[in-house]
Amino acid sequence: LYLLLVSFIYLPLYLTGVLSIKRKILYHKIKQRLKFSSNSVLGLVSRKHQVEDVLEVSTNETIDFLKHRNPCYLHVIAFSTPNELVKLAFREQTIDLISDAQLAYVIFYSVYAHALEWDENIKMYRLDMQELEQFYLFNGFYWECRGILIRPTDLKIIIKMNDGNQYHSDITGSDRANYNLAKLHAQVICLSYLAPGLKHNHVHFVFPSSVCVHAKQKLDHQSTLFKLLSPHFRFTEQINHQALFVGKATSNKRTLFDRLFFFWQPLPVTNEQFVENVAEKCKTYYIDTG
């Protein structure tokens, strides 16, 4: 079934995508030759929360992204999506439960670390997830985890759920299944949205975008400072613009195509909720608290 899908549907789509990328690159290069290329423009993300991000992407950035980043997405769409469809058809779509050590590592050594707080009373780090309450989810989706506590000395973990129950990692016997289920909720459902949607907005948006745009426009591209900075903000314009103003990965309307074919739209919320939440978080961090 996988070979049939790839041979008759996804390989032609892949080749069409490759040609489309080449066509777009040629189009933007012609614009450059004719002196119609554009510069990056910063603009409001939200009228309610007055913060700015990349409203328009420069022609140079667009070409760079098309040449060196878009093919990665195309390969995943063309050759990973049919594999997921096969699993869906045979009801074999499963998620492996990660170990406690893996969960602790992800929280301590990824973007979640920006949101950790030390609780002196119980000598544990706290990852608060109460903000998940504010979202309106599609029918059939539930974000039930409300917090994770981790003790760094022995990696003891406590997972708090929305019904008030707490599940401890050192539990044994038949109750271990309840802890594993709580961890699965945290792993698959809650943490998958928590990072992009709630806990590292200020790391990803507004300030990095501003540095990227102004550095490209005002610094000498041959200077040492620009050469040091440029690898860190490469693709920042396009990625942040797509996330906030295009929304290919977050514009999930729960249609038939969204559910069965657009596997890069995993979030059970609309793009409008995602964008307004990002804008609110960035405003709180950069403007309200300084």
Image (cartoon, rainbow, N blue to C red):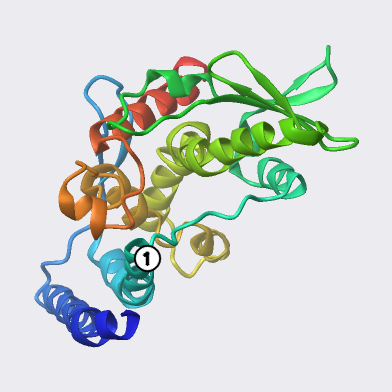
Dividing the picture into quadrants, the one containing residue 275 is top left
Using residue 95 as the reference point, say whether residue 238 is left or right of it: left
From the image, which quarter does the N terminus lie in?
bottom left
Would residue 128 be seen by someone viewing this image from the given angle? no
Where is residue 33 drawn, in percent x and y?
A: 14, 79
Where is residue 20 drawn, in percent x and y?
A: 16, 78
At 30% from the left and 75% from the top, the residue drawn is 78
Residue type at numbered disc 1? Phe
At 89% from the left and 37% from the top, the residue drawn is 154
Q: Nearer the viewer, residue 157 or 106?
A: 157
Dividing the picture into quadrants, the one containing residue 6 is bottom left
Where is residue 170 drawn, in percent x and y?
A: 83, 33
Would residue 202 be seen by someone viewing this image from the given angle? yes
User: Above or below — where is 168 with respect to 217?
Assistant: above
Q: What residue is shown with label 1?
A: 90
Is label 1 in a helix, a strand or a loop? loop
